[in-house]
Amino acid sequence: MPAAGAALAVAAGGPGTAGVRAVLGLDVGGTKIAAGVVDRSGDVRSFVVEPTRAGGARGEDLERLFELGRRAVAEAGLALDGLAGVGIGCGGPLDATRGVVSPAHLPEWREVPLVALAEKAYKKPVELDNDATAAAAGEHRVGAGVGTSDMVYLTISTGVGGGVVVGGRLHRGATGNAGELGHITVDWRGRECRGCGRRGCLEAYASGTSIVERAREADLEVASATDVAAAAGRGDATARAVWDETVEALAAGVTSIVNAFEPEVVVLGGGVTRAGEHLFAPVFERVHAEAMTEAGRAVRIVPAALGERVGVVGAAAIVFEREAAAHA
Amino acid sequence: MPAAGAALAVAAGGPGTAGVRAVLGLDVGGTKIAAGVVDRSGDVRSFVVEPTRAGGARGEDLERLFELGRRAVAEAGLALDGLAGVGIGCGGPLDATRGVVSPAHLPEWREVPLVALAEKAYKKPVELDNDATAAAAGEHRVGAGVGTSDMVYLTISTGVGGGVVVGGRLHRGATGNAGELGHITVDWRGRECRGCGRRGCLEAYASGTSIVERAREADLEVASATDVAAAAGRGDATARAVWDETVEALAAGVTSIVNAFEPEVVVLGGGVTRAGEHLFAPVFERVHAEAMTEAGRAVRIVPAALGERVGVVGAAAIVFEREAAAHA
């Protein structure tokens, strides 16, 4: 990461800019909410995080989120006036056009006009995207996908989410819900998907939740997907079978993605990718063997670069991206 | 289709245009080659078609294709000088950047520099795309996808191909091979795919070839996919099982497409769609039930509008599309 001084010089350089053009990024996740102030160069000037409080009254949760944002602004040594805008990445489904969210992971939030409420709270323009789409924007702008025209980002965590960059721009789809790559089919008569209820989604095999669940069904005592990968690596046959099935399903999903989008790069992030080479090596090998020849040759499969801050960096990135699109 | 006079008035209206700005479209398919002159409005001024001659020497086939194009130009009452350009849709794989094709359905064409050869033959600028991508451009410009920003086209014929429009523009991918939607997974441990060799592709269940093959494996005497659909409609239990599996696989594939792209419309074309409501009604029902809620709500699933001329109209459309992009 560049030194703060260098980042500031870049950040302050825009035309018509008074002071630092930093953005507040808010990340509304299923297990945590996070806020941070991010420079144009991707430098994170402050970062605060709290566990998501499930079941609270809707108003309280929102106020807690907005307060977390104010804390991030203060910790960055700024006032709200110093912000160029606010970006929010939120779990889907949502309607990006209307700025309304109904995240699956927060059942008490239904049709919440998040953009209007955040604009009222911060007196700044607010941009909203699906959290995985925002993360894709972050990886594309300052992470593992820098400089690519066509990129797919896949986050493999509790669930599986995705974001897509086509021709250098985020692909949002008809209502902002494109890139639900956890819910592409790998086996239409297969395992039930906890995320959407139908059978055989990628998420029903490759998510951390499913990996642990399938390991326990096979009588393994494990706490996480990484445990399963490690046991498989040590030669445990049962863990090996679960892990192999995971890798096969993930490779089948990524092959579909590669054949459909022909991206230059597929970026894999999320907790399950901590399995490292246990995951990347066999998935890479299978996708290259199974994808259509040209697309398989063209694609790289790489780990995400932004770690736990991808949510806020991504949320900020959607503001910078829309600004750039408006000036294009 | 508008009368020729109206089409000409539109076609002649561009800035800096001398005479009619018509385009020669060439469609290089597995069973037929076709050529036609197409106006800016999509009006087909001439259309000629011949069966693909398999196994011929590469030079002979190319000369036959180029001669077919010259015939189409003559039948339209034009000279080559009257053309704005030439568009070619060709079966993949290909490298659109280098203008080189190696179509799977023409094993004797390997690394053929089709664009350079056509430019030499016609003395006109030549554009090349995958045939299904070109067809998608045609349906988007003057067919079932007119006016949409995000559209997916799927042709279900001998094989299954696809083309994708994102943000009003064709999505070509890293080397022009995006949209290979016949090779998205529906069952990764499933049936072998004749098109690409791996298991469980959409094409391995939904293509006309697979439908007939699976029907015959079940001891049905059928000549085409439409026969299977008709027998299923008459209540034949064996045909019904084959058709139901086809519909389930197709719906699983379209659900993946809808969740990944969130298009406004999915256009289904190709011979298998002659099954009509036997196909559209149950696929529509399943996709709406199984896709993520917002994307499922947003999408329409409609039949292609351009019929057997989609190939040449599409090949012409890629020329008009690139021209528009260059002026944007």
Image (tube, coloured by chain):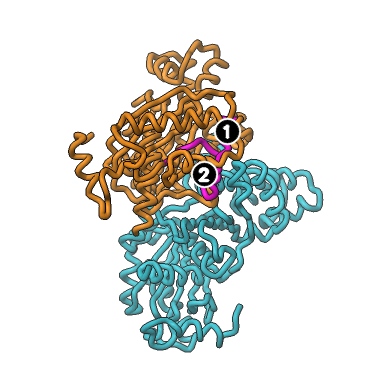
Chain colours: A cyan, B orange
Residue at (37% x, 41% y) in the render? B316
Q: Where is residue B302 in the image (x, y as percent from the top left)?
A: 33, 36
- Where A54 sits versus B169, above or below? below
Helix, strand or loop under label 1: loop
Marked residue chain, label 2: B
Task: Give the distance between the C-alpha atoms of the residues marked 1 and 2, in whole angstroms.
Answer: 20 Å
Residue A254: within the magenta?
Answer: no
Q: Quadrant of the C terminus of chain A?
A: bottom left
| Residue for badge 2 | B116
Q: Start and end of the magenta stretch? A: B87-107
Closest to the observer: A65 or B232? B232
Marker disc for residue A33: none
Closest to the observer: B200 or B79? B79
Helix, strand or loop under label 2: helix
Closest to the observer: B250 or B77? B77
Closest to the observer: A81 or B325? B325
Please tell me how crowded label 2 is: few (under 14), some (14-19), or many (20+) other residues with Cα within 10 Å: some
Res. A275 in view: yes
User: Magenta residues: mostly which secondary structure?
Assistant: loop
- Identify the amino acid type marked 2: Ala
| Residue for badge 1 | B104
Residue A242, image quadrant: top right
Residue at (55% x, 20% y) in the render? B213
Residue A320, image quadrant: bottom left
Residue B92: within the magenta?
Answer: yes
Q: Quadrant of the N terminus of chain A?
A: bottom right
